[in-house]
Every structure is written in structure tokens, then in C-alpha cells.
Image (cartoon, rainbow, N blue to C red):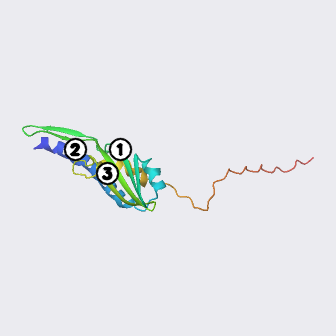
Amino acid sequence: MRTFVLPLACIAGLSGCSLNDSRLAHQAQSGLVGFSERDLDSCLGVPNRRAEFGQTTILSYDGASSTSSGGIAVTLPIVGGISFSGGGYCHIIARLENGRVASIRYNGEKDATAAPDAYCAPLVRACFVRVPVRSLTTRVTDPQPTPPAEHPAASP
């Protein structure tokens, strides 16, 4: 009985990482809605393919990735071996209406074990990194030189 506990604990622990990736990928499908094309390109990179149909633009991003879970192969007596892959690929299809993301779809070998769309997470993760936001009224200028400290005049 103990021989099954360790492999099952490892599988459960590693699948937890894939589940987080799966959640991120699903959040991106709604979180990217409303992004401008420039915003999308700044976090996903330049699209591999682009097509325009009137006010609709389709952008396609390709990527091979692996989730943070890596991979694992377990050999059990009598039952045989079980392998959990550590890699796949994801194609992201973004539909823009009037220059704004209207929907995000994924296709490809994008599902990790028990974690749908997990292999898409590394591609969209950069879109959700928190970056300090500057006010639109703040101008970046060259730093002004600091005036030298005044020294009291030497007395005779």
C-alpha cells in the first residue's frame, strides 16, 4: 500500500501546477477581451498570421510550451507504466472587432492531464504581469541637475 502513496502524492502535487496554468489560460480568455491590438502584440508578440474581413481582424499566435509541472513517468507493478506528458503546443486565435479583442480561442495539443488548456498559459502569462502604471499626465524627462550646495563665505 505504501508503494502507491508516494507516486500518487507526486502526481497530485505536479498536477496542481497544471491546474494553476489551466485557470490562468481560462482567465485569459475573458481577461484579454477589450485589449487593443497593440496591447495584445505587446504581451503575446507579433502574430504568426493575420487576416482582415471588414471590421473584423483575426490574429493567430503559435507556441510550443510546457507547463510548470514538467513530466512524470511512473511504473507500477502489474498495472504497467503511466506517463504524464510535460509538453504540448497551443495556437491562440484572437478575434478583434473594430481594433479591440472580442474573443480568444485556443486549439492544438493544449490540454495537460486533468488541466484543459494548460499549455496555453505560458503564452498568455506575460499579459497579466503587473506593471507599474504611470499617470497619462506624467512626462518622462531628463533628470534636472542638482544645484551645488551653497557654502558659507570664508571669513578673513
- Residue 81, visible in the rendered structure: yes
Q: Earlier in the sequence, mark 2 or mark 3?
A: 2
Give the alpha-carbon distance from disc 2 to disc 3, as whole Å: 17 Å
User: Picture coordinates of residue 141 (x, y %)?
Assistant: 66, 53
Give the alpha-carbon distance from disc 2 to disc 1, as whole Å: 27 Å
Dot in front, 2 or 3: 3
User: Picture coordinates of residue 128 (x, y %)?
Assistant: 42, 55
User: Picture coordinates of residue 14 (x, y %)?
Assistant: 25, 46
Q: Which residue is mark 3?
A: 21
Which element type, helix, strand or loop, lies under badge 2? Answer: helix
User: Between 57 and 78, which is closer to the camera in this rendering?
Assistant: 57
Which element type, helix, strand or loop, lies under badge 1? Answer: strand
User: Between 122 and 72, which is closer to the camera in this rendering?
Assistant: 122
Which element type, helix, strand or loop, lies under badge 3? Answer: helix
- Residue 130, visible in the rendered structure: no
**Relative side of 37 to 115, left or right:** right
Image mark for residue 63: 1
The amino acid beneath tag 2 is: Cys
User: Picture coordinates of residue 65 (x, y %)?
Assistant: 33, 43
The residue positioned 21% from the left and 51% from the top of the image is: 114
Q: Which residue is mark 2?
A: 10
Image mark for residue 23: none
